[in-house]
Image: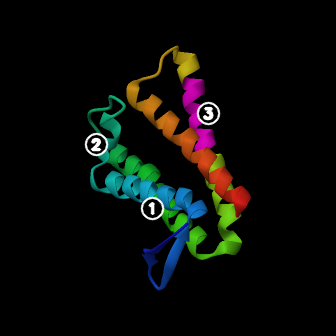
Amino acid sequence: MKARRLLCVYPVCMTHIDLHHAPIFLALILALVMGLGSIVAPIRVTRQFDIVTLTPAGRNEVRAVYGGFGLAMAAMFATALLQPDLRSGICLTAAAALAGMGGGRLLSAGIDRQIGRFPLFYLCLEVILAGLLFYAAKIG
């Protein structure tokens, strides 16, 4: 199943994306939203986790970790879509990173004996996206 002119990344435009590219495209969009949102409004990120004020150092940390990492991952997902020979390695690495984040959330929930609404939401998102990217890595 192919959709015409679905993705155009300068300087190369893809004329179609196969269904097995959908997880990579989804990950690209989510990483881009996370990265840009974190750079523009870092307090919105931390409010989800009950951190309502940030010092300049705190804003710097959010912009670096969530913003910079998100934008770098978006660039890697774009690379995975445009460079088939790199696709499996990028997807496997990103899947492992997401699984590690999910594992860290589970560990924290076990230590604290609770998990908040937003951490639970992100845990589910990380696990699902890790599985989809592992699948994308497997089918290359």
Which residue lies at the image location 43% right of the left edge and 54% below the top edge? 30
* Percent of width and height locating residue 55: 29, 41
Which residue lies at the image location 35% right of the left edge and 51% below the top edge? 38
Up-down relation of residue 108 to residue 104 (above or below): above
- Crowd band around label 2 with a 10 angstrom C-alpha radius: few (<14), some (14–19), many (20+): some
Q: State if disc 2 and disc 3 touch (CB < 8 Å).
A: no
The magenta stretch is 98-108
Up-down relation of residue 33 to residue 18 (above or below): above
Evaluate whether residue 55 shows in this view: no
Which residue lies at the image location 70% right of the left edge and 64% below the top edge? 140
- 78 on left or right of 94: left
Evaluate whether residue 28 shows in this view: yes
Work out which quarter of the rendered image holds the N terminus and state it.
bottom right
Which is nearer the eye, 38 or 18?
18
Marked residue nearer the N-terminal end (1 or 3):
1
Check residue 43 in the rendering and tell me which mark sits there, or answer none: 2
Which is nearer the eye, 57 or 117?
117
Residue placed under numbered mark 1 in the picture: 71
Quarter of the figure with residue 67 = bottom left
